[in-house]
Image (cartoon, rainbow, N blue to C red):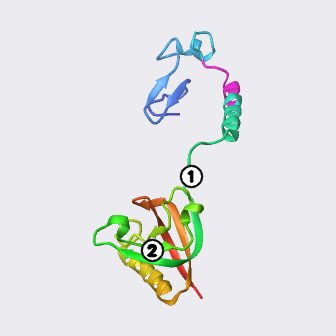
Amino acid sequence: MGFGAKPGATGAVCSCLGIRADAQHYPRFNAFKHGKMPGAPMNFVSISNRAAVAAVLLSVLPNSSVLAAEAVVTAQINRVLISADSTYGGCMAALSSNPQNLLPACLADWVSFSCSGHFTDAVRGFRMLDQAQLALATNKSVMVVVDDSRRHNGYCFASRIDVIR
């Protein structure tokens, strides 16, 4: 029994709004409820079947939306960049292997560590840049996880960098 309903009353009750729709309050309710009026409720089983068929058809059709992706790039560091403002996220590294080959949404060669603090905190961004500088100075390879859903001026964000022996 819903809000404002009397004991023994019949009819549809919306307990959240206190709305009643029954023959006592609305004489046309019974005719509508039993399908004797134009616009009466349709057969809900057939609507459910149609909805299920539509859902299956839509799920097998090609989807034109682009999903964000991550890729792992193993490369050497060719250059590092630090800017005085937040252009390119404040710091970047150029990789010997182009991340754009795996993630076409990224611009070529460079990844941003977001030292500006936009995609990670600035301290963590600078620590990732430190790792890139270490790899550059020691001629070591790096493994970089690149995320094409987060970009600075078109250059993808590197969410992780590992220096490899």
* Distance (Cα) linking label 1 and label 2: 25 Å
Say if 63 sits above or below 14 in the image. Answer: below
The answer to which of marks 1 and 2 sits earlier in the sequence is 1
Task: In the rendered structure, find residue 33 and report the number of the disc placed on it.
Answer: none
Magenta part of the protein: which range? 41-48
Is residue 62 on the magenta stretch? no
Residue that carries the numbered disc 2 in the rendered image: 93
Residue at 52% across, 56% down: 105
Residue 134: where, in percent of width, then height?
47, 87
Badge nearest the viewer, 1 or 2: 2
143 to the left or right of 153 = right
Inspect the image, locate mark 2, and give the three-letter code of the amino acid beneath it: Ala
Residue 40: where, in percent of width, then height?
59, 15
Mark 2, secondary structure of its residue: strand
**Is any part of residue 117 visible from this angle?**
no
Q: Residues within 10 Å of mark 2 (few under 14, many from 20)?
A: many
Residue that carries the numbered disc 1 in the rendered image: 67
Residue at 52% across, 63% down: 147
Mark 1, secondary structure of its residue: loop
Q: Residues within 10 Å of mark 1 (few under 14, many from 20)?
A: few
Residue 116: where, in percent of width, then height?
34, 70
**Is any part of residue 116 visible from this angle?**
yes
Question: Is mark 1 in CB contact (under 8 Å) with mark 2?
Answer: no
Residue at 49% across, 77% down: 78
Residue at 55% across, 67% down: 98
- The majority secondary structure of the magenta stretch comes to helix
